[in-house]
Amino acid sequence: MAPKIFIDGEHGTTGLQIRTRMAGRRDVELLSIPEAERRNAAMREDMLNSADIAILCLPDDASKEAVQMVSATNNVRVIDTSTAFRVNPGWAYGFAEMDGAQAGRIKAARFVANPGCYPTGAIGLVRPLRAAGILPDGYPVTVNAVSGYTGGGKQMIAQMENPDHPDAIAAPHFLYGLPLTHKHVPEMTVHGLLDRAPIFSPSVGKFAQGMIVQVPLHLDDLAEGTTMESIHAALVAHYAGQDIVSVVPLAESKALPRVNAVELEGKDTMKLFVFGTSGASQVNLVALLDNLGKGASGAAVQNMDLMLAS
Ligand SMILES: NC(=O)C1=CN([C@@H]2O[C@H](COP(=O)(O)OP(=O)(O)OC[C@H]3O[C@@H](n4cnc5c(N)ncnc54)[C@H](OP(=O)(O)O)[C@@H]3O)[C@@H](O)[C@H]2O)C=CC1
Ligand SMILES: CC(=O)N[C@@H](CCC(=O)OP(=O)(O)O)C(=O)O
């Protein structure tokens, strides 16, 4: 019998994209609630407890409620796409490529926390350098990023697409998270293996899906002898043997005039770049992804497939 999958929040931005990715799959059975009943707690509880895997695509509070609804006595496994459980040690962090053992942890887990979109880029860049001893304790990491506006869910999509919305946003590009307390900072710190919280400055551009995450570094403050080439080699070594996260060859990135935020729209992969000038003292590490691809829905389906393969 095909495993049953219930997407709680299936009519929201992340949920819809998971459904699109699952369309046509015969190896799973999708349980579904009509859109008009999406907040019907009794129906949701019934579906949650009938599923083999429940994928939660809800705001944090609703995710916590849904986890409470999953009966303690059954074996429903959960993938949560919200921020609620990402630094909870009882949950496996759903970034399979972040180290060699993570895919195995996801396969074996009952509860998997899908990463945030920005942290996928930031952790993807810094964790291998921490693990390799290149990025020392106390280094003041900064993370600057731009996201497509679908990252803000249904509400921000309406604000950006509908000029008659009472809180319409006309700006083609804006900074936010200005108090520097964005909810993704703890996750970047813990899974980035950082001992000091990064300064995180997010922004949104007038494009639906795509993301650039930048981590600039001063080579003089890294491990003795670190070069642009040695950072690149550490990333290449870390991501060898899988095909979701790729490290762009230096010869290719040196020839690029620009990085296009929407290049990976609709794709579930992530590209990492090391920019700078050989022999100079600074580099800029860049991650390119789709906020709804490897940044959310694509990662959720990847995690579901890992769990089904266990
Ligand atoms: N969008 C993105 O790029 C990313 C999103 N995420 C995370 O995924 C989760 C979902 O976000 P997103 O899809 O963008 O949000 P949306 O607002 O687009 O969708 C959320 C859905 O959940 C429903 N919902 C809200 N509260 C409840 C409730 N109490 N009970 C049942 N259903 C409820 C909403 O219904 P209604 O229409 O009635 O409000 C809506 O259908 C969030 O935690 C978000 O932070 C993670 C990474 C990236
Ligand atoms: C553009 C925008 O608003 N983005 C969202 C993050 C999207 C995401 O990763 O969602 P989680 O809430 O699940 O972490 C934000 O900054 O809150």
Image (cartoon, rainbow, N blue to C red):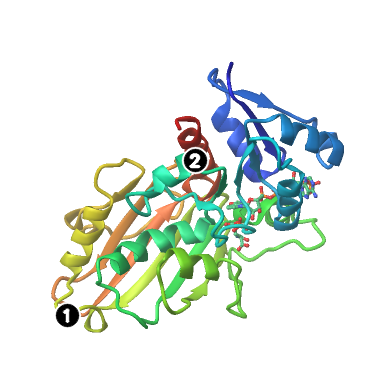
Q: What residue lies at 62% left-to-right and 44% top-to-bottom?
A: 14
**Sooner in the amino-acid sequence: mark 1 or mark 2:** 1
Is there any visible trace of residue 120 in the rendered image? yes
Q: Residues within 10 Å of mark 1 (few under 14, many from 20)?
A: few
Q: What residue lies at 72% left-to-right and 36% top-to-bottom?
A: 48
Q: Residues within 10 Å of mark 2 (few under 14, many from 20)?
A: many
Q: Amino acid at mark 2?
A: Asn
Quadrant for ligand 2 reads: bottom right
Q: With 183 as the anchor, is 306 left or right in this view?
A: left
User: Which secondary structure, mark 1?
Assistant: loop
Q: Residue placed farthest to the front in the image? A: 73
Vertical side of 216 occupied by 289: above or below: above
Q: For this rendering, which residue is in front, 68 or 116?
A: 68
Measured from the top left, where is residue 118 in percent x and y? 50, 60
Q: What residue lies at 82% left-to-right and 61% top-to-bottom?
A: 166
Measured from the top left, where is residue 157 in percent x and y? 68, 52
Q: Amino acid at mark 1?
A: Glu
Q: Check disc 2 and report the residue beneath it.
A: 303
Q: Tags 1 and 2 in contact by the CB under 8 Å rule?
A: no
Vertical side of 60 occupied by 16: above or below: above
Q: For this rendering, which residue is in front, 28 or 116?
A: 28
Q: Check disc 1 and report the residue beneath it.
A: 224
Vertical side of 127 occupied by 136: above or below: below
Is there any visible trace of residue 40 in the rendered image? no
